[in-house]
Image (cartoon, coloured by chain):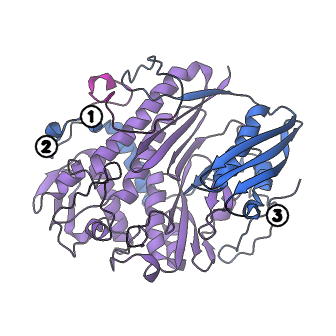
Amino acid sequence: MGAPTFPRKGAKGTTMADGQRTPPGAGEQWWRKGKPGRLKSSMVGISAAAVLGVYAAGYVSSSDAASAGERVQAVTPMPATTIPGATAAATPRATSTPQTGTTTGRAPTGATAAAPTATPTAARTTVATAYQDGTYSGTGAGPHGGMTVSVAVQGGRITSVEITSCNTRWPCSRIADMPARVVAAQSSQVAYVTRATDSSVAFVRAVAAALEQAR
Amino acid sequence: MTLQRATAGRVFMDTFVSFEVLHEDTETDAADAAMSDGFRWFSDVEATCSRFDPESELRRLCARTGEPVTVGPLLFAAVSFALELAERTGGAFDPTVGAAMEAAGFDREYRSQESHPHDAVPGATWRDVILDDDARTIRLERGLTLDLGAVAKGLAIDLAGQAFAPFRGFVIDAGGDILTGGTNADGGPWVIGLRDPIATDVLAGSVRLTDAAICTSGGYERKAAGGGHHILDPRTHCAGPSTPAETASVTVIAETAMAADALATAAFVLGGEAAIAFLEDEGAEGRLTTIDGRVLATRGFEEYWL
């Protein structure tokens, strides 16, 4: 399989070679120790302590279901009432939450101990451990059009990804390097893109749809 | 035991928030409860820190000037973190740019599209916000609008992440600000793409992450009516190609989303080598792309490249 190549411009003071790079401490889960370093006094250290402190204090308020009347009086100490997971039933948020766009999924189970209120409907699938050998076709659509890909699996591993049709408003050559990335990642889980949106979405969805069949 | 993948998404803070949690089939109820908790944290943070909701704790704080106001732990933590960052960046990051944001056209509540302007005196800076750690009070020396946009969403992500910590693995994606925990279904790190800030249809590359957040500040989304991007240089109250001119986008990896998001915003304004040095000092990794396509990165960033 071809090594993935990225349009790297070179980090500060380093000339990076294209192609497969062996990370430092290669082999055993190098990424586990790849956490960003931090000093307690750094902004990262401060943020980590702040998160733990707020989490320990528990939910802030009766929050989004609270009426305006309830809120007006309380510029003063917010009652840090509930500990996460403990007595959430006591608070009046619930069915009238203003959020929109809940994704699909099961009906609320009602089985959750912590929140018998508006349980988010989680979609749930069983994750198979390996892909089944074969060639799978998947189609995905994004805001700028759709595409179809063909994904080949051999020996439980993704061995190739091919874009078989491309109906996007932009030239498909723009994502010419993405199939190699899926092979390198052994996953469509490039699904998460920092500052995501738009066009590569169609590709990622198409690969995910193909791999869904391989599970 | 079989591994389950649970996903759910809702809209908070003008963005789509999605959870993915990997758990054993014996943990279904616990995972559902954790997802509830996660959304609840987003709801709490939004209700507390919204700049648009006149009834938010933040707006009620901003309505009072010249007297110490006792606030809850969440708002205090968010403001405290924002002020610390303002001090360390010499004001390049400044949570009091709220009034300028309103002036630049970012004044609409995203659900209702209603505008709720209020009285703020121009010229306020972060130095006009006085904290008392012991009493947990905040005093505003003059009328100003606090904007916790660069801090609150990250904090919500991190709080939700705490709820998901017991499980095999999870990803929280709030409009491209992402926190990963544990491992993916294959037992490996999560793979996160970085959008190219110039050719925004393609990825600039991908990184492998676990137990870390990645956030990007870029000038290519959320344009205001006037065409400027959403990051103002607090020192000039200007946005767009004229001020933080060189930076097209900054991606930051850090242990928390709160740090990653806020540091990315600060680095965007600082720009260039100063931004990279700042990120290294503050315990984060980052990658900055300039408008003309140059890439600068911290020494450790490339270790994450896929």
Of badges 2 and 3, nearer the viewer stands 2
**Where does the C terminus of chain A fall, quadrant-wise?**
top right
* Real-space Cα separation, disc 2 to disc 3, in angstroms: 60 Å
Q: Is mark 2 on a helix, strand or loop?
A: helix
Give the residue pinned by disc 3.
A19
Q: Which residue lies furthest to the bottom in this view?
A: B242
Amino acid of disc 3: Gly
- What stretch of residues is rendered in magenta? A82-103
* Chain B tint in image: purple
Which mark is on residue B25?
A: none
x%, y% of residue B227? 42, 72
Vertical relation: B206 (above or below) B37: below
Q: Which of B54 and B172 is in front in this view?
A: B54
Q: Which chain carries label 1?
A: A
Vertical relation: A118 (above or below) B289: above
Would residue A141 be seen by someone viewing this image from the given angle?
yes
Q: Does the magenta stretch include residue A67?
A: no
Which mark is on residue A72?
A: 2
Q: What element carries label 1?
A: helix
